[in-house]
Image (cartoon, helix red, strand yellow):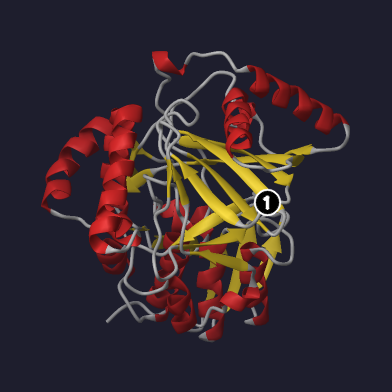
Amino acid sequence: MFPNYMGEEVHILGAGLSGLAAATILARSGREVHVHEVREDSGARFDGDFQGIENWTSEQDFFEELEIWGLDSREFKSDSFDIVDLIHPDDVITNPKTDGVAFRVVERGTAEHTIDQGFKRMALSSGVKIHYGVKRSPEECLIVAAGPKESSAVAFGEIFETSHRNMVAFQLNDKLAPGAYSYMIIIDGVGLICTCLWRKQRKSGRYLNETIAWYEGKYDLGRKPIKRVGGKGDFGLPTKYVHEGRYYVGEAGGLQDFMWGFGMRYAITSGVLAAKAVIGECDYEKEVRSRLVPLVKASAINRFMMNRIGDRGFKMVANQWMRDQRRKGDGLAFMKWLYQPGFLRKALWPIVKIGMLRKRVLSDGRVVHRMPFRKALGRDEWEQGDRAQEIAKEWKEAQRSGANLSFSESEA
């Protein structure tokens, strides 16, 4: 019914989560699998920053899905949360919560306990051959799982030591995070404060300094900077997910959350589906379009609206979130609702496609409707406060003492 590549070598481009998930399942099915990665290790794109795996786009807990697929969540460290500090634009703090797991926090990077290294271990133990530090053409690979090449949004963060308890705080604030949000995650004495920018800025480091100053003013952190990190996201929807016989997964397939930037669940799921397609168990194009594309489109519609509402709209969203929790008794229900492809969202999709996305033909011939990095607005021009300026000076001093910077403004 579906193509079956039994007996053939399978080559995968990219040793991230989607590529390694696909490789593990294929190797266990008896294929000889080669993964090619331009970086020196899995997770080398990251530098110890925390990221979240959401648990609201499916009725099934994601770790239960991993178990069904034969992927062991015990291979990496994770911390689950059922409550978050939701910080409104006017600095009011409320607490969405659920009886189950709202999301899990994992660390990215090359340390043994990271999710990247956990997936690497699963692949190697299954017999996958990983080739690091090599370049391989996508045309030479059956599965393409490469990372982003351009920027639709960027994130800047600082990792620090702290004595504060474990927690997650999420802030909707158009000044500190233009068009997006900032957040703070604290796990076992290590914290991350990060601001996400969905509008291109000059002197973008000032947003991180001002965001750190805000969190310091609200929480007793005893912050000691360790390093500064960051990354970029490239958001777009291709017209096809199988192109010239190649399967495009994860970020290479545009399978990202436009609204919040959550991508790990989509990445791993798409890698698993691609492997099953290669084995002959499913139709990848059909599965992606039924399981993942509706979620991506819903997130793009949400992003389109967020781009236009500013702090007044953010306040309305936060208030509605809490009203929904009081009515239903579950803070996760609102997040699930945001990703339901209802009548209104379906009606908005043509407007979103024209108003936010730009059609492009990529070098490999694929057609993608991509979200460009938006221009700054007049309200984005402001001067740092006194404490933010002090934080900037403290960071320069920390750098002189050996603190590392892994993502600069120029890389954005």
What is the x, y in percent for residue 281? 35, 81
Q: Is residue 137 above or below residue 394?
A: below
What is the x, y in percent for residue 207? 56, 27
What is the x, y in percent for residue 293? 29, 57
Res 40 quadrant in image:
bottom right
Side (left or right) of 306 relative to 349: right
Q: Residue beneath label 1, please? A: 164
Q: Is residue 206 above or below residue 326?
A: above
Most foreground residue, 31 or 388: 388
| Quadrant of the drawing holding the C terminus | top right
- Tell me if residue 249 can be seen: no
| Residue under the image location 30 percent in, 43 percent down | 319
- Label 1 CA crowd tier, 10 Å (few <14, some 14–19, many 20+): some
Kind of residue indicated by mark 1: His
- Tell me if residue 12 can be seen: yes
Side (left or right) of 203 relative to 83: right
What is the x, y in percent for residue 81? 51, 63
Most foreground residue, 61 or 191: 191
Most foreground residue, 115 or 211: 211
| Quadrant of the drawing holding the N terminus | bottom left
Q: Is residue 276 above or below residue 318?
A: below
In the picture as drawn, the residue positioned furthest to the right comes out as: 401
Side (left or right) of 20 relative to 358: right
Assign a secondary structure to mark 1.
Answer: loop
Res 242 quadrant in image:
bottom left
| Residue under the image location 74 percent in, 61 percent down | 111
